[in-house]
Image: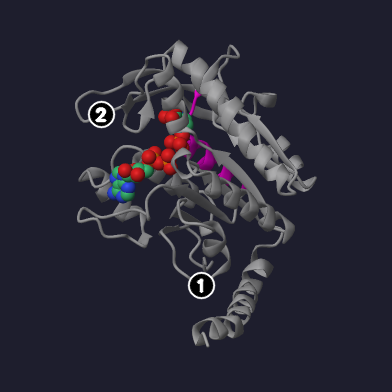
Amino acid sequence: MDLGLDMSREILPHIKAGILSEALPYIRRFAGRTLVIKYGGNAMTEPELKQGFAKDIVLLKLVGINPVIVHGGGPQINEMLEKIGKIGEFVQGMRVTDGETMNIVEMVLGGQVNKEIVSLLNVHGGKAVGITGRDNHFIRAKKLTVDTPEQKSVDIGQVGEIASMDCTLIKQMVSAGYIPVVAPIGVGEQGEAFNINADLVAGRLAAELGAEKLVMMTNITGVMDKSGNLLTNLTPQDIDSMVQDGTLSGGMLPKISSALEAAQNGVKAVHIIDGRVPNVLLLEIFTDEGIGTMILGDNPTVQAA
Ligand SMILES: Nc1ncnc2c1ncn2[C@@H]1O[C@H](COP(=O)(O)OP(=O)(O)O)[C@@H](O)[C@H]1O
Ligand SMILES: CC(=O)N[C@@H](CCC(=O)OP(=O)(O)O)C(=O)O
């Protein structure tokens, strides 16, 4: 007799029912609210993870929560650049973007990655619609220059910062039952395309929409200190000193500054979580587990889960 198997047959249904029951208060709390989810390019490498992500998003929508997705695609852009013999170069976490690179960025983000996510969501029963910031000129951009420790105002080409964002269309899509999937491309004054880091778009969009949460799915357990220990909670003061002493670098720089901007502009909580963990989104939203790193918003009366 296999006692282990018999036990699991008896116990498993109770565990599953327990998980569903644990989700109820969170479903009630977040129903009708908007969650912005940043889906990083590094979190979308495995086919099973992509399927799982799409199912989790559709489930959120079906229980009455309004997910809005902003996706990245850094590794996917690098792959395409390599095919034409170019190597991706980054300054302070931002891609150096000449004219040829911009064409590839737009092709990969607005075409390949955006349409793949939209299609997966629709296959799993969602009503997803993909847009870039050039649609209806929803994200207006201006040229970004970055400061490095060595040099001020470095010109990195066709890279944009957000000049303004008009979320009317996104709000209409959400209230009509659609799941917006946003590619981080902005439009300049002459109608030209700008490459914007996806974390910047996600942070600003979450603030503009007054999102309940901003969840950033990346390829690391969360924000680490210098010794590699996970930091489960961060305050603006912690972030300041970690930027100064170099604990945060590369792609974590735009991520954390966008997280901070969102938290200081009405978003109740920002979570940086590991998108390589199956169903991590559901774990974060519907369970009592503390996952990844949380940055709480300015409103101290609100208790974030
Ligand atoms: N203190 C830190 N804690 C965690 N990750 C960090 C830190 N400093 C730099 N990083 C880097 O930031 C990366 C996440 O940023 P990025 O590669 O741009 O992800 P994404 O594609 O999800 O936006 C991590 O994989 C890690 O290499
Ligand atoms: C200016 C800039 O850096 N743009 C990013 C846009 C994509 C992105 O942000 O992708 P991840 O979220 O996967 O890193 C880039 O070209 O890689």
Residue 158 seen in this snapshot: no
Seen in the image, is 167 located left or right of residue 156? right
Q: Which type of secondary structure does the marked residue at label 1 adopt?
A: loop
Seen in the image, is 23 located left or right of residue 156? right
Q: Which type of secondary structure does the marked residue at label 2 adopt?
A: loop
Mark 2 vs mark 1, foreground winner is: 1
Residue ranking furthest to the right: 176
Using the image, tell me which numbered label, if any, was put on residue 148. 2
Out of 105 and 119, give the one closest to the viewer. 119
Out of 266 and 29, give the one closest to the viewer. 29
Q: Position of residue 169 (x, y in %)?
A: 72, 35
Compute the Cα span from label 2 to label 1: 40 Å
User: Can you tell me whether the CB of the residue at mark 2 lies under 8 Å from the nearest atom of ligand 2?
Assistant: no
Residue at the (57%, 15%) spot, across then down: 189
Q: Which residues are magenta?
A: 195-209
Membership of 197 in magenta stretch? yes
Q: Residues within 10 Å of mark 2 (few under 14, many from 20)?
A: few
Q: Position of residue 152 (x, y in %)?
A: 26, 23
- Disc 1 marks which residue? 288
- Ligand 1, seen in the image, is in the quarter at top left
Residue at the (23%, 44%) spot, across then down: 244
The answer to whether the residues at label 2 and label 1 have Cβ atoms under 8 Å apart is no
Q: Amino acid at mark 1?
A: Asp
Q: Position of residue 266 (x, y in %)?
A: 54, 52
Membership of 9 in magenta stretch? no
Residue at the (38%, 29%) spot, across then down: 94
Quadrant of the rendered structure where residue 68 is?
top right
